[in-house]
Every structure is written in C-alpha cells, then in structure tokens.
Amino acid sequence: MKTFQIKGTVRQAVGKKENKALRAQDLVPCVIYGGENVVHFQAHENEFRKLVYTPKVYQTEIDVDGKVYNAFLQALQFHPVTDKLLHIDFLEIRENVPVKLEIPVRLDGYAKGIQQGGRLKANLRTLKAKGFSKDFPDEIVIDVTELNISESIRVGDVKVPGIEILNAKSVPVATVVVTRAARAAMADTSTSAPKAKK
C-alpha cells in the first residue's frame, strides 16, 4: 500500500471556538486515535488534497512536531454548503491490531455478456475489509471476463489473502445486466425461430 505524508502541529486548544479560528486560517483540525494517546493536531488544508480527493486508500505518515504516527484516514467532515474540509479523523496503525477499511474495487477484463449485448454494472465501488495494515492492497481487482448476461460476481466470490471482507456475501459486486437492445434481440430471435412441424 502506498504511503502519503502529512506535516502538522499540535493543537494547543480543543473546542468549537478554537476550531473555527483554525478554519479561518485554512487550517484543518484533526485527531489521531486508536493508539496509547489521542493526538489533536492541525495542518493546512493543502496538505490533504491528494489524500482526500481520490478513491485510493493510503497509509498516512503524519509528522506532528517531529513525532511520526502511521495511520489510516477514517472519517471526513465537510461544510454542507461550501464543501470546505472541516475535520479529519485518523486511526493509528498498531502492528498487532486489525483495522477496518473501505478498499476501492476495480473491475478488470471484458465480460462475455457485453459481447452478447449486455452492460457491465458496478454495484459496489468499495468493499469493507478487516485485517492488518501490512496485508491491505491498494485496490481489490476483480476479473469479470467470464460473466455472461444476467450473471453476477458476489461479495462471497471475492477472496483477498489475509483480508476478511465484511459486506454481506450475497450482495453483487458486479453484474452484466440485460439492455433494451439485447432484450429486443432475444425477443426477435424467439419470434423468428422456425416452428416445429407437426
């Protein structure tokens, strides 16, 4: 998994008034939890652009006044009107403690059902996974080549070494759906088929 680096400074005060003052300076109040101590820090909003506005998952190295913490981004808070980044929660990585993450899904291959006139539909963009940080991939790649029309790959079909997928196993991740054109073609085929002689 790729690593993203952030530099911040310890927040001297915690509260709504203090947070509002930080945001006025384009600073984002943040917290790191899950370790021995909860760490409150601040960093300029530009530090987070590549981390926040991407579907990818990064392990984050956060340098807070010279002390480095390894963490995963856990929660984001945006202003409902301006979309300005208001707050970030990070979960500190501990070697022997499993964590839960949303891992992006990438569909790979050209499904047979597309050649039959169907359309590939991605039902889940991410999968909720549990495991140790060292085992998490950047993304979960799913081969859809063998999917025919009306067939699906379900969560239960997805296997990632060392990782437990937490979504319900029956939920489809990707499906080749029947398009109107394909349905019409199938209907034409059935009506134009020669009838058996009596």
Image: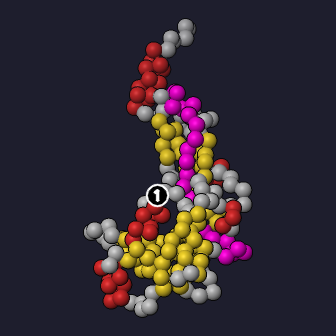
Residue 184 screen position, x and y as percent:
41, 26
Query: In the drawing, does residue 166 fall left or right of residue 40?
Result: right
The answer to whether residue 195 is above or below residue 112 is above
Q: Quadrant of the C terminus?
A: top right
* Residue at x-position 52% and y-position 27%: 115
Query: In the drawing, does residue 100 fall left or right of residue 27?
Result: right
Q: Nearer the viewer, residue 92 or 182?
A: 92
Query: In the drawing, does residue 163 fall left or right of residue 90?
Result: right
Residue 45 screen position, x and y as percent:
39, 71
Q: Quadrant of residue 27?
A: bottom left
Color encoding of the figure:
secondary structure
Q: Which residue is mark 1?
A: 54
* Residue at x-position 48% and y-position 43%: 121
Identify which amino acid the numbered label 1 is placed on: Thr
Residue 160 visible: yes
Residue 147 visible: no
Region in magenta:
94-116
Q: Quadrant of the N terminus?
A: bottom right
Magenta segment includes 97: yes
